[in-house]
Image (cartoon, rainbow, N blue to C red):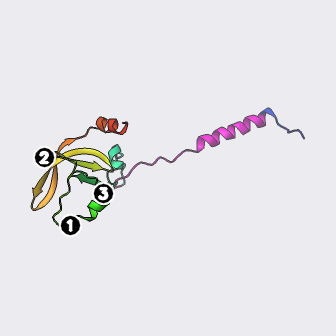
Amino acid sequence: MAENTTPESDSLAEGLKDRAAAAVRPADYDELDGEGTPRAPAVLNDIDLVVDVPVQVTVELGRAKMQIRNLLALSYGSVIELDMLAGEPLEVVVNGCLIAQGEVVIVNDRYGIRLTDIVTPAERLRKINR
């Protein structure tokens, strides 16, 4: 069967398609304040999207490798030799990535860390690429 089309029906069909495509668009509403008047849209910084994401922060005094027999032999008062020297800065690690170094402080009978050096983003990328 052959379709019966005329130039008028073709142009009418294309006009309907164009009008339908132009008519479908997302709604655009102005923000209203409490009094019903439009207000300026809030500007969000990229950092605002992630400030509430929890991360694991670790402060490392040092590390040690030992055999299980030595670990089981530890008792009250045992000393474990760490791989860092006394006076070296502590490492602040966030989600496994070194972000800063600092020194131990005591404030109101609580231990803390005073940051003395913060790793720049360029240094962090360089360490990741190794």
Instruction: Please indicate whether residue 113 sits to the left or right of residue 93 in the image.
Output: left
Going from N to C along the chain, the mark reached first, 3 or 2, is 3
Q: Nearer the viewer, residue 78 or 52?
A: 78
Query: What is the x, y in percent for residue 69?
Result: 29, 62
Per the rendered image, the range of residues in magenta is 8-35
* Amino acid at circle 2: Gly
Query: What is the x, y in percent for residue 68?
Result: 31, 60
Going from N to C along the chain, the mark reached first, 2 or 1, is 1
Disc 2 target residue: 87
In the rendered image, residue 26 lying in the magenta stretch gets the answer yes
Query: For the residues carrying marks 3 and 2, which lies nearer the camera in this image?
Result: 3
Residue at the location (37% across, 52% down)?
32
Query: What is the x, y in percent for residue 53?
Result: 34, 54
Going from N to C along the chain, the mark reached first, 3 or 1, is 3
Instruction: Please indicate whether residue 7 sits to the left or right of residue 73 in the image.
Output: right
Q: Secondary structure at mark 2?
A: loop
Disc 1 target residue: 75
Residue at the location (35% across, 43% down)?
46
Quarter of the figure that contains the C terminus: top left
Residue at the location (33% across, 38% down)?
127
Query: CA separation, marks 3 and 2?
Result: 27 Å
In the rendered image, residue 119 lying in the magenta stretch gets the answer no
Q: Quadrant of residue 9?
A: top right
Disc 3 target residue: 67
Query: CA separation, marks 3 and 1?
Result: 15 Å
Q: Give the mark count.
A: 3
Q: Nearer the viewer, residue 117 or 9?
A: 117
Q: Is residue 122 above or below residue 84?
A: above
In this view, the residue farthest toward the top is 7
